[in-house]
Structures are given as C-alpha cells and as structure tokens.
Image (cartoon, helix red, strand yellow):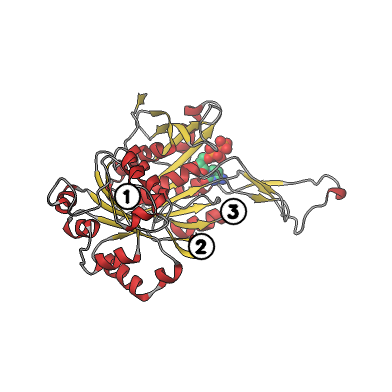
Amino acid sequence: MTATPDTVSPVAGKTIVLGVCGGIAAYKAVEVCRRLVDAGAHVVPVMTKGAEHFIGRTTLSALASEPVQSSLWDEESPIPHTRLGQSADLVLVAPATARLLGAYAHGLSTDLLTNVLIATRAPVMVCPAMHTEMWEHPSVQDNIALLRRRGVHVVEPESGRLAGGDSGKGRLAGPDSIVTAVESVLGPRDLEGRHVVVTAGGTREPIDAVRVIANRSSGKQGYAVAAEAVRRGARVTLVTTVELPLPHGVQPVCVETAAQMQRALDGLKDSADVIVMAAAVADFRPVACAPGKIKKNDGVPEVHLEPTPDILAGLGAAKRPGQILVGFAAETADLVANAQSKLERKNLDLIVANDVSQPGVGFQHDTNAVTFLRPGEALESHPLSDKRDVARALLDIVVGLLG
Ligand code: CTP
C-alpha cells in the first residue's frame, strides 16, 4: 500500500495580476486575492482610481504578494505596464466595470490596468459586476461578445441582490467560482475534449407526499470531482440530488430518486468518456408512494420495500471499450474486501473506498480518507485530506487510464 502526498493547486507558483475596478463588488476582490495567495499564487494587485473609492490600498497590499500599483507614472519601474504584462501568467480583472470592458474591448489604454491588459500576452479573465440595466445594455453585451471572440475568459455575473437594494443579474460571481475558473485556465487541460458525467448526493425515495427514505450523503465529494474535471478542461454533466453552489462551467441535471438518476444516466452514458458514480444511491425504495400525506391518526403505516436498480452495475455491464467507470464504496467494516468485490462485480476501472466510521471521513465532511482500487493494481491509499485533493488524485488516475 503506498501513501500519496497531497496534490498542489494549479495556481501555485503562478503570477496573477489582479485588476480591481471601481464597483461595490471591489470588496470581494479582497477574498479572491486571499484565496489565490493561500493556494500559492504570486498575486500582483492593480487598482483603478475608482476602486480606491471602495476599498483601501492597504487592505489589498497587506493580503497580496506585492503592494498595490495604480499609476503609470508614480511607480519605481518606468514602464510598469509592460513589466506587469510580461511577468503575468494570467491577468484577472474582478470586478470588471462597464468602463473597463469598453476600454479593453476598444484598445483604449487610459490607466495602468488598461495598459497592462493591452501589453500582456498572458490569458485574460474578466469578472463583470454592475447593475442589471448596465449588464444588459447592448454596448456592454457587444463588448463582452467581442472580448470572448478574442479568447478572453468571462466569468459571468450572478443573479442576486445588488447595491441599493435592487435585485437581478450583475452581481460579481462568488470567490469560489472565480478561483475555480482561474484554476481551470492555469491548470493542466488533460481532460480537454472529454465528457465527464458525475453523480452526487443521496437519492430520496418517497414514502408519501411529504416523507422520504434518504441517507447522509452531502454530495460534496461529487461536486469536488465535477469542479476539478471542469478545471482540467472537460465538459462536465453533474447528475445531482443536492443544491450546493454549482461549480463554474458544470451542467447540472437535478434528480431525486434512484429511478430518475438511472434515466438521466441512460441519456448520458453514450456520450460519456468517464462516469464517476459518487452518489449514494438508495438500495431500497417503498413499493408504492402514498398519494397524499399519511396521517398519524391512521396508525403506524407498513412500508413495503423493494430493491432499486443497481445503476452502476448496469453501466458496467454495458460499458463501451475505452469508457472509464468509477464507483465509490462507503464502508464501515472490511473496507478493502468489500470494495474489491464491488470493483469486480460491477466491472469498474476504479473504485474509491472510504471507511465512513472514521472521524472526518466521507458523509457531510469537507475531508475524506480514501483507498483507490484498480483491477490488477496495487492499492493506493490517501490520508485524510480535503475532498478537492481527493478529486484531483482520482482524476489523475482517470487521465492515466484514458491514456
Ligand atoms: N450504486 C448504484 N446503484 C445502487 C447502489 C449503488 O449505482 N442501487 C453505486 C454507488 O453510486 C456507488 C457504488 O454503486 O458508486 C457502490 O455503492 P454502495 O452503496 O457502496 O454498494 P452497494 O452495491 O449498494 O452494496 P452495499 O450497500 O451492500 O454495500
């Protein structure tokens, strides 16, 4: 059995110029900056004059890897824009205002940030944030379309509460989405062109109109696999029973029961290069669902159960040559023997076994300790680590299997 060290974030060691424009969402750039620095990136902050109305230079300087720069003329370097543009592995603008998008789209270099954008050959990512009326204005939409055509990565704003109490589309994407998008641009693109289908969460099997048989699965491991697969360039479909924040770029399919999950997978399996069954599918379901609510005064109901279809075994039996099938085995005893038997019985290429009786492992937690089993290969065991690290290690194996 070999222990594998934790994997590192794809942003580690990379230089990211973080441009911050003048909008109320500028305060969220501070969190984005902190997360990128925590992940090992060298973050060089550039603020516009407008941004300084919303957050202090000291705040960003304290959290970034270098002090804030904002002027073409006052810096030590005589040509700060070319120095910054050339040293960057990525220029990220969050938030990007309508003014910045317009200037960048039309080559207007009016301040340090717009000069850096035009002077760089590194990939550029913009994260717009503005009021709905501005976001929907044809000039802004045309500028976004122009930038996209030039290969600029756009992290779309979200819908939600805006400054001044309004509500609508235009709110800066959350720090999680922005960091995931950055990792996807800077990380290995070894799943480019692949369709990865992931399932997540526990199924819910209805007893009556209000009651279900459920399980403790939170869906976090499946979501982490989906986010990592997007980062690595895959087209990702996530068949999910839970509503966690959706990783940037993931296509969701919402289901509740084992039967619905099976139907969803029936429609996806032919185009899938990889299927990762991280969902905890109920093994039994009520034979019938009472149409209304069963009333307490009617006495204790008898619930007759029947087995659900084993979705993964069905996928294993119909597996195409070259398709990679990954299962999970949540166990409380005889971890390796149980997982080995499922690996063989369900015709899998990989099974991820975890002992959910151990502290911090599996259901509900942000962490997991897993053992990977493959046909004819030595076991690979990972100590307790973040579910994102488990996802990376899992997809490293999948990439190897895809060849
Ligand atoms: N699985 C499935 N359909 C089911 C039950 C499980 O597709 N009806 C999948 C799970 O998504 C998981 C793998 O099979 O990837 C193993 O699930 P698990 O519950 O650990 O194993 P079971 O085969 O259900 O056996 P047992 O519950 O007896 O451990």
Secondary structure category for the residue under label 1: helix
Q: Distance between the residues labelled 2 and 3?
A: 37 Å
In this rendering, would 312 be left or right of 78?
Answer: right
Q: Name the residue under label 1.
A: 182
Quadrant for the N terminus, please. top left
Question: Can you give x and y, in whole percent of width and height, for residue 154 in the image?
Answer: 33, 60
Crowding at label 2, few (<14), some or many (≥20) Cα neighbours within 10 Å? few
Closer mark to the observer between disc 3 and disc 1: 1
Label 1 C-beta lies within 8 Å of the nearest ligand 1 atom: no
Residue at 49% of width from left, 46% of height from top? Answer: 312
Residue 256's label in the rendered image is 3
Residue at 40% of width from left, 37% of height from top? Answer: 390
Observer-nearest of 233 and 136: 136
Crowding at label 3, few (<14), some or many (≥20) Cα neighbours within 10 Å? some
Quadrant for the C terminus, please. top left
Label 3 C-beta lies within 8 Å of the nearest ligand 1 atom: no
Q: Where 1 sits versus 318, above or below?
A: above
Residue at 22% of width from left, 53% of height from top? Answer: 71
- Hey, what amino acid is under mark 2? Gly
Q: How far apart are marks 3 and 1 (CA)?
A: 32 Å
Q: Can residue 277 be seen from the camera position used here?
A: no
Q: Name the residue under label 2.
A: 164
Question: Can you give x and y, in whole percent of width and height, for residue 56 in the image?
Answer: 36, 47
